[in-house]
Image: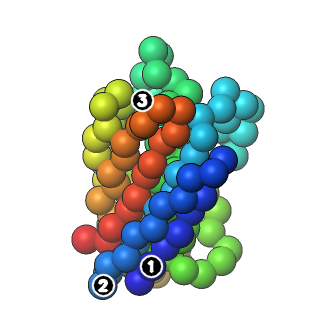
Amino acid sequence: QISISHSHGLAAVIAAPEAVGIDIQFLVPKIERIAYKFMRPEETACLHPDYRIEHLHVFWGAKESLYKAYGRRMLDFREHLGLQPFTYQPAGGQCRGWIHKEGYRAEFRIEYERFDDYLLVYARQE
């Protein structure tokens, strides 16, 4: 499978035999205004107060990556996609994510890295 993303002049690509997705985002504070559309309560509870914007971008990028890995439409980012709560690491890190929809269940390893004003996130099915 292959996944592609672009943001503000940068592009990212990932290819693997298993389901994968990738997302690159330019960091913007306005993500706070739409967080309610994609964050589950337990995810919001784990946000790092000193890195809230970056942490939200990891959740958004991870869910975009999961959506791309799923390869079909009609996923609700709050209901069908989730991440286990994790501690944001400024240098980059990993967490676990999942897709659960109507009998379909898949677990993913999520990796993220910040560089300059961008955040790169990708998901690989386990």
Front residue of 33/99: it is 33
Please say whether residue 88 is visible from this viewpoint. yes
Residue drawn at 40 percent across, 70 percent down: 14
Instruction: Give the alpha-carbon distance from disc 2 to disc 3, as whole Å.
Output: 32 Å
For residue 72, side relative to residue 115 (left or right): right
Instruction: Measuring from the top left, give residue 29's x and y in whole percent.
Output: 67, 27
For residue 64, side relative to residue 47 (left or right): right
Front residue of 124/107: it is 124
Instruction: Measuring from the top left, give residue 48's x and y in whole percent.
Output: 43, 22
Q: Decide: few, some or many residues near mark 3? Use Cα within 10 Å; few <14, some 14-19, many ≥20.
A: some
Q: Quadrant of the N terminus?
A: bottom left
Q: Is residue 78 above or below residue 28?
A: below
Instruction: Give the alpha-carbon distance from disc 1 to disc 3, as whole Å.
Output: 31 Å
Residue drawn at 66 percent across, 47 percent down: 8
Query: Closer to the N terminus: mark 2 or mark 3?
Result: 2
The residue tagged 1 is: 2
Q: Is residue 4 above or below residue 122?
A: below
Amino acid type, residue under disc 3 in the picture: Cys
For residue 18, side relative to residue 47 (left or right): left
Quick check: marks 1 and 3 in contact, CB under 8 Å? no
Instruction: Measuring from the top left, give residue 106's x and y in whole percent.
Output: 37, 72
Amino acid type, residue under disc 2 in the picture: Pro
Quick check: marks 2 and 3 in contact, CB under 8 Å? no
Instruction: Measuring from the top left, give residue 70's x and y in whole percent.
Output: 50, 76
Nearest to the eye among marks 2 and 3: give it.
2
Figure quadrant of residue 11: bottom right
The residue tagged 2 is: 17
Amino acid type, residue under disc 1 in the picture: Ile
Q: Quadrant of the C terminus?
A: bottom left
The residue tagged 3 is: 46
